[in-house]
Amino acid sequence: DDSKDTSFVEFFPNPASTTIHLQLPSTPATITVFNLLGEKVREEKVSLPAGQAGGGEITMDVSELPAGLYFVRTEEAMVGKFVKLACR
């Protein structure tokens, strides 16, 4: 039954300008961001505060990335893509 996919990750906003928020099914996890050339531009090992079991929401700073299209993945799977807008 595919409706119980535990590797599903949601993230928002899209497009983003300073941060993206990822809803993870479990932690710890490593979140990696790639540019269109497939180059790793950001990697962050994340975990939830002690005492908080299972998954939860993580915030990742993307303000230093140039404007463009980026791909996000965890160790398990490609999560999706987001558009980084220029900061004003």
Image: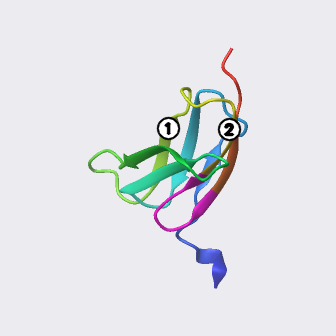
In this picture, residue 45 sits left or right of residue 50: right
Q: Residue at x 62, y 53 (%)?
A: 10
What amino acid is labelled 2 in the image?
Answer: Pro
Q: Magenta stretch: residue 2 in it?
A: no
Relative height, residue 33 to residue 77 (above, below): above
Which is nearer the eye, 41 or 72?
41
**Helix, strand or loop under label 2:** loop
Q: Quadrant of residue 49?
A: top left
Tag 1 residue: 60
Q: Residue at x 58, y 38 (%)?
A: 20
- Number of marks in the rendered image: 2
Q: Residue at x 55, y 66 (%)?
A: 77
**Helix, strand or loop under label 1:** strand
Any mark on residue 47, and which?
none
Tag 2 residue: 13
Which residues are the magenta region? 72-79
Q: Which colour scheme appears in the figure?
A: rainbow
Q: Sequence-wise, which precedes: disc 1 or disc 2? A: 2
Q: Residue 4's x, y, as percent?
A: 59, 76
Which is nearer the eye, 6 or 87?
87
What amino acid is labelled 1 in the image?
Answer: Met
